[in-house]
Amino acid sequence: MIHLVRSPQGVSRTTRKAALCLAATALALTALPATALPAQAASDPLARYHHQHLDWKSCVRGQDDTTGKELEQAGAQCTDVTVPLDYGDPGGRTITVAISRIRATDTAHRVGPLLLNGGGPGGQTLGDPPWVRQAMKDVGARYDVVGVDPRFVGRSTPLDCHWPTGSAFRSAGFDRAGFDRMTAFSEDLAERCRQHAGDVLSYATTRNTARDMDVIRAALGERRISYLGYSYGSYLGEVYTTMFPARVERVVLDGVIDPDRYGPRLLQGTEKANRHALEGWASWAAARDATYGLGRTRGAVLAAVDRVQAAAARTPLRIGEHRVDEHVVPLIVFNGLSQDNDSAYGDFAQAMRDLLRAADGHRVTASPWLADALAFLLTGTDSSYGSVQTAILCGDIAAPRDPEVYWRDIQRARAQDPLLAPVTNNVNPCAFWSPPRERPTVIRDDLPALLVNATGDPRTTYEGATAVRRAWPSSRLVTLRGADQHAVYGVYGTPCVDDTVNAYLATGRVPARDVTCAARVP
């Protein structure tokens, strides 16, 4: 998913990853073993990667490796795939990409590998095969379900700029002084990346991740792969199928990004969907005022949120050891709006109750969800996540370099949504980044894929999914109507969506027409 502030309710159901604090100078230099290559490989500059031997092992790395233990319990094994750092110099420096695999058990009807990407960009997917295999039900037995930590992510030669935060994104706040602070903040993050990872930054791109996927395909000994991508993973799927159209079997894109809207400012235009999600949550919280005390009406709950933001602008709120200011409160709100279910709504409501008590001057110990969000935003624990996410966004497509462009956009959008527009339109480190090494991918104009999106998705809006559907007439769109939900298949829990996706994975045939599914009735 798109986790500009990473959410504990993300696509992955595994435990949150531990931060990996390795400087760029510690990136591994690996060498491929000498291998006898087929004669036809002589003309292939990537032959030594395509024909490498994969050493499958246990996924468990140490006593506290919850992800590895969950993979092992599900019957998965793990290995590292060696890929070039620079595909323009395949004989040069190499890095490794970590993958996991639950093998097909119905070998008589085996389709092949299904590669996964859970989004981010920068999210780990290595731990996802167990729950995806479960969501696939019977058809899962026909696939090798393969999780991939993309280059520089998680176990794959991680990149870390040593940031004091896990996210480059902030609100611009209320005035020009706040915007100027965030401009300086963004410039500092960009400079830290140049200092700590400057030799690899330009190779953290979606096009290179797609190239890595094709090396994985070849190293697995497969002519074709199928693919399931969520959110940013939908854009990765669009790029892979454009670059390697003959290597694609079945493709599911959930939380669909319009490639014409992708880039460092991909949240621009999502204000309306996020406001709708915020209002839906406020109605839910108002019906539970006895539990959360945020107000008895939707308007009262929304007013409480605004009161927290105003208080944080006057004096940063004290939450345990953290100080929460006007630049962070809207990110907490934004982070609470990607999942449409009671558990996620309850976590967010508890967080707002904590913030409201702090705004009233009480000493507050953060509830678990809020504590997690604040550690992510206000400490360097997850520096590697924000570092690689930003490197990919900046490395794919150039951003405006003049801060005044962002300031004007914020001022125009502020009237419609003074809380969230200063987040979605704000300056970020890409304004201070080196230009991309390659031009953006021109996505092919027809893809026989199955697209999945909720009408109220606050991250990858429904308008993006319908735009892609129009561009690709041979695709079909599965719509979840009436839910403010980001990521649907296997996550939201509606049989209508899950059964449609599984039927496609079983047959390779998209439905005869688009499918609309109703959200759960509360």
Image (cartoon, rainbow, N blue to C red):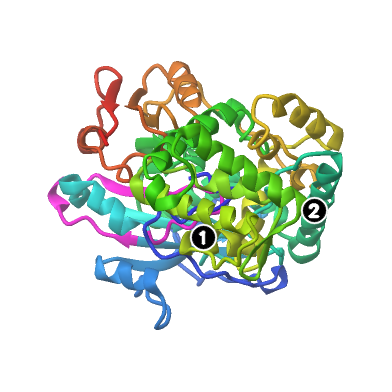
Task: Name the residue: 77% across, 39% down.
Answer: 174
Where disc 2 sits, the SS reads: helix
Image spot of residue 388 (x, y percent)? 63, 56
Task: Name the residue: 47% across, 64% down.
Answer: 368
Please give the label number shown on residue 139.
none
Where disc 1 sits, the SS reads: helix
Amino acid under label 1? Answer: Arg
What is the magenta range?
A: 101-127
In depth, the one of 464 and 404 nearer the eye is 404
Q: Is residue 118 magenta?
A: yes
Task: Name the residue: 26% across, 53% down.
Answer: 133
Image spot of residue 236 (x, y percent)? 51, 41
Image spot of residue 228 (x, y percent)? 37, 43
Which numbered disc, 1 or 2, marks the residue closer to the eye?
Answer: 2
Which part of the image, by quadrant, shows the C terminus? top left
The quadrant in which residue 361 appears is: bottom right
Q: Is residue 92 magenta?
A: no
Q: CA distance from mark 1 to mark 2?
A: 43 Å
Up the image or down, 61 lies above or below 428; here it is: below
Up the image or down, 437 lies above or below 99; here it is: above
Q: Which residue was labeled with disc 1?
A: 48
Q: Which residue was labeled with disc 2?
A: 185
Q: Is residue 257 visible?
A: no
Q: Is residue 467 left or right of residue 503?
A: right
